[in-house]
Image: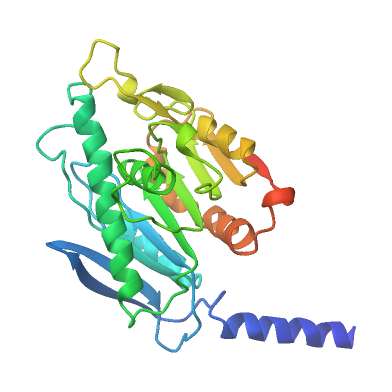
Amino acid sequence: MRVSANIWLLALTLYSLLGYGQQDSQVTKQTFQYKDTLQLDFYALDKAQAVDKPLLVLVHGGGFASGKRDGADESKFCEVMAQKGYAVASISYRLTRKNDPFSCDCATEKKMSTFVSASEDLADALAYLSQEQSLKFDRNQIILIGSSAGAETVLHSAYMSHHYLFKHIPPIKVSGVVSFSGAMVDASYISKTNAVPALLIHGKKDELVPYATAAHHYCSEDKAGYLMLDGPLTLAGKLKELKTSYILAFHPDGGHDWANKAFSQTELVQKFIDEIVLEKKFTGSKFKGKKIKLH
């Protein structure tokens, strides 16, 4: 028992030295202008934590018309995840639908250009972060996280690279994707070359962004903004086909409010990142797809 206790103490000490599990360290926040007037906030434990950490990049929601990188939910989420030992960046991006709502009256072509513009900005933010040598994180471990419009941005950025509208965007190498109430245009663009593990959190009765496959905002076919989207249930099916691990976490009666409620699921996000993305427990021959009912 004495030997086991000593081993446990040594493991706990190493865990603390690596920056994970520390609950009293100071989280610092730095703001950078990465493109034109667009800014990002970088959160990390204080400079005493010298170890390279995975980078989480958060893209806020708001229908591409509103929202901000430092909103109350976004800021709290970033601070909590930084306290857990990750480096975290929350970015601003062009709100191209600010004067033209992202609804059934917004033409499909405009919706597609909106997805592309946001993906361009995310790619530029990642390029800036990777080149800024003062920022300490593992450049081979980047996880994209988005809420609502931000979730659509990270899904398209990660999985639509082969689509002709996205091909001009520099390739984005990421290790995982976390979507809070998001969907993408066509899950068939997920392939062996771009499939990465995903955590998909969604309300099953979302009336704006489909849980399975349906029209964006459930617009009718005669509307200018009729555009089919593949939601998390469909995405999970494609990832399963490619033996790429995923967690599909759904609330049976939840709506689009889970775009905000999901910010509280920090333990689930941490579990996904640590076990599936970093430790690669369930990839390839060890593939694991999991459904979780949220309460």
**Left or right, 194 with reference to 9:** left
| Quarter of the image where the N terminus is located | bottom right
Q: Name the colouring of the figure.
A: rainbow
Say above or below: 163 vs 17: above
Residue at figure coordinates x 74%, y 49% from the top left: 285
Say above or below: 184 vs 41: above
Q: Position of residue 181 (x, y in %)?
A: 41, 38
Residue in front for this viewpoint, 270 or 33: 33
Q: Position of residue 234 (x, y in %)?
A: 52, 30
Residue at figure coordinates x 61%, y 40% from the top left: 242
The answer to whether residue 254 of the structure is visible from this angle is yes
| Quarter of the image where the C terminus is located | top right
Q: Position of residue 109 (x, y in %)?
A: 21, 29
Numbered-mark total: 0
Residue at figure coordinates x 50%, y 54% from the top left: 176
Say above or below: 268 vs 140: above
**Left or right, 122 with reference to 55:** left
> Given the current orientation, which residue lies at the most extreme top position?
222
**Left or right, 81 with reference to 100:** right
Residue in front for this viewpoint, 59 or 68: 59
Q: Where on the picture, by quarter, is residue 280?
A: bottom right
The answer to whether residue 294 of the structure is visible from this angle is no
**Left or right, 57 with reference to 112:** right
Q: Position of residue 228 (x, y in %)?
A: 37, 23
Residue at figure coordinates x 72%, y 87% from the top left: 10
Q: Where on the picture, by quarter, is residue 222?
A: top left
Residue in front for this viewpoint, 148 or 241: 241
> Given the current orientation, which residue lies at the most extreme left position?
99
